[in-house]
Image (cartoon, coloured by chain):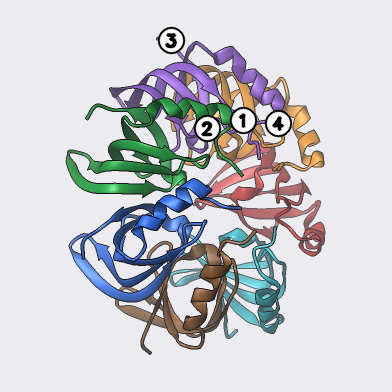
Chain colours: A red, B cyan, C brown, D blue, E green, F purple, G orange
Amino acid sequence: MSELSPSTFKELKSYLGGYVLVKLKGGKGIKGILRSYDQHLNLIVDNAEEIEGESTRALGLILIRGDNVVLISPASK
Amino acid sequence: MSELSPSTFKELKSYLGGYVLVKLKGGKGIKGILRSYDQHLNLIVDNAEEIEGESTRALGLILIRGDNVVLISPASK
Amino acid sequence: MSELSPSTFKELKSYLGGYVLVKLKGGKGIKGILRSYDQHLNLIVDNAEEIEGESTRALGLILIRGDNVVLISPASK
Amino acid sequence: MSELSPSTFKELKSYLGGYVLVKLKGGKGIKGILRSYDQHLNLIVDNAEEIEGESTRALGLILIRGDNVVLISPASK
Amino acid sequence: MSELSPSTFKELKSYLGGYVLVKLKGGKGIKGILRSYDQHLNLIVDNAEEIEGESTRALGLILIRGDNVVLISPASK
Amino acid sequence: MSELSPSTFKELKSYLGGYVLVKLKGGKGIKGILRSYDQHLNLIVDNAEEIEGESTRALGLILIRGDNVVLISPASK
Amino acid sequence: MSELSPSTFKELKSYLGGYVLVKLKGGKGIKGILRSYDQHLNLIVDNAEEIEGESTRALGLILIRGDNVVLISPASK
């Protein structure tokens, strides 16, 4: 049971190794380096920071469960 | 496990390459150029802007996870 | 994985080409001409207007993702 | 993928053709004549009225998507 | 696709014919006689009363959709 | 369609017959003796008490539907 | 029906035996030693503490149901 088609899966490859901003359900965001992802949109993000309004918090190397993801955008460090 | 029937999938083709407004669960919107989509309604949107009330924010080339989508409408730039 | 049985699917045919009011989860409504639908209740609605309380907003030809639909009723223009 | 077992499906037959009150997630109710239903609890309700607190609103012949249904009870006209 | 294993299914048999209190998502409760249930935890409850805080309301013979159920406990009349 | 892998299923055996605290979505808790569970995390809990903030309420022998469970921890009587 | 691909499953191995911070839907967090996990992201966490704002509460050896997990990050004791 995949939630990404093979074509969408490939599109995400261009994000690998770069900084991304991941918006989560509920309004928080995570910024960090996208290390890997799978077809359920589970993400391994390194140097991750949680962003909530103006405040940020370092989280390190994290796993994000795919069903919480709203969108992924490229980000600058 | 597809969430779009083949006929609905085809209907979306007319949106490709043009500006769309994507309304998300929770009330936010995304405006941008629809680059691709799949049968789960995952969307690749370029020149994306997040719209919340009167404020907008540039996001670039983004992936929207399909289960967050409420509706897609054509938009002007 | 269909969310409409064949019998319910057929019942919706009488709505095609006419104005419908689609109530969405979260309380908003969409009014427009039902152009097509599939077994997941994804809807293509033309001349669509978003209705929220007293205010309306023109959206054009839209796709509504089926899992947001609460109910569909016939509507006058 | 059915959400009603055959035995529960049969129990609903006694409601057909009579007035029912359908309670929906989020707190609203729908009263009307149950015309048909399927194994996903999608309902076709005629003479439907939306009930929210003390106010009611006529909706006509409607389709209710089954996953919004909390409960179904018999009702008087 | 069952949501009750056969062993859990059997455990519910002891509730049949007696008064139960069914707690629903969102905080309401239903009290009544458990007439039947299926493997999705859809319930037929007779003499049902909706309980919300201190107020109760008679509903008669109802069907509760299983995915709204939080818990079922025995109750006195 | 199981929601517990066989290894996680086995880990829960050590809780059987002892008092557990079950945290539910929405913030309530249930304390009682874990009598049985299945691979969907449906729980039969005896001597169950509902805990909400400082107040508790006796519920007896209950079934908790697995999809409401956030976590299970051992508890003292 | 797995919610972690084999590659993502392996990535979590580096967390085993160490302290992790698990963020849950709804805003709470759990800190403790990750003892095991499965492909649904069900977690067994030892020495678990619930964290809500500034307050913490000891929970012992707990099972967290995977569908409540937002993210997992390494943590110091």
Q: Quick one: label 3 or label 1, which is nearer the N terminus?
A: 1
Residue under the point 28% across and 23% down: F57
Q: Please state which amino acid type lies under the numbered disc 4.
A: Asp
Q: Are marks 3 and 1 on the same chain?
A: yes
Q: Please state which amino acid type lies under the numbered disc 2.
A: Gly
Residue bearing mark 1: F39
Q: Quick one: label 2 or label 4, which is nearer the N terminus?
A: 2
Q: Please state which amino acid type lies under the numbered disc 3.
A: Ser
Question: For the residues marked 2 and 4, what is the alpha-carbon distance in whole angstroms?
Answer: 19 Å
- Closest to the camera, between mark 3 and mark 2, is 3
- Closest to the camera, between mark 1 and mark 2, is 1
**Against E57, is G32 above or below?**
above
Residue bearing mark 4: G38
Relative image position of residue A57 (x, y in whole percent): 58, 40
Q: Are marks 1 and 2 on the same chain?
A: no
Res F76 label? 3
How crowded pointer 1 is (Cα within 10 Å; few <14, some 14-19, many 20+) is rated as: many
Query: In the figure, residue G47 lies in which quadrant?
Result: top right
Q: Please state which amino acid type lies under the numbered disc 1.
A: Gln
Residue under the point 59% across and 59% down: B67
Question: For the residues marked 4 and 1, what is the alpha-carbon distance in whole angstroms?
Answer: 13 Å
Q: Chain of mark 1?
A: F
Please, what secondary structure does the residue beneath circle 1 have? loop
Do residues under tags 1 and 2 come within 8 Å of each other at their CB atoms? Answer: no
Question: For the residues marked 3 and 4, what is the alpha-carbon distance in whole angstroms?
Answer: 27 Å
Res G29 label? 2
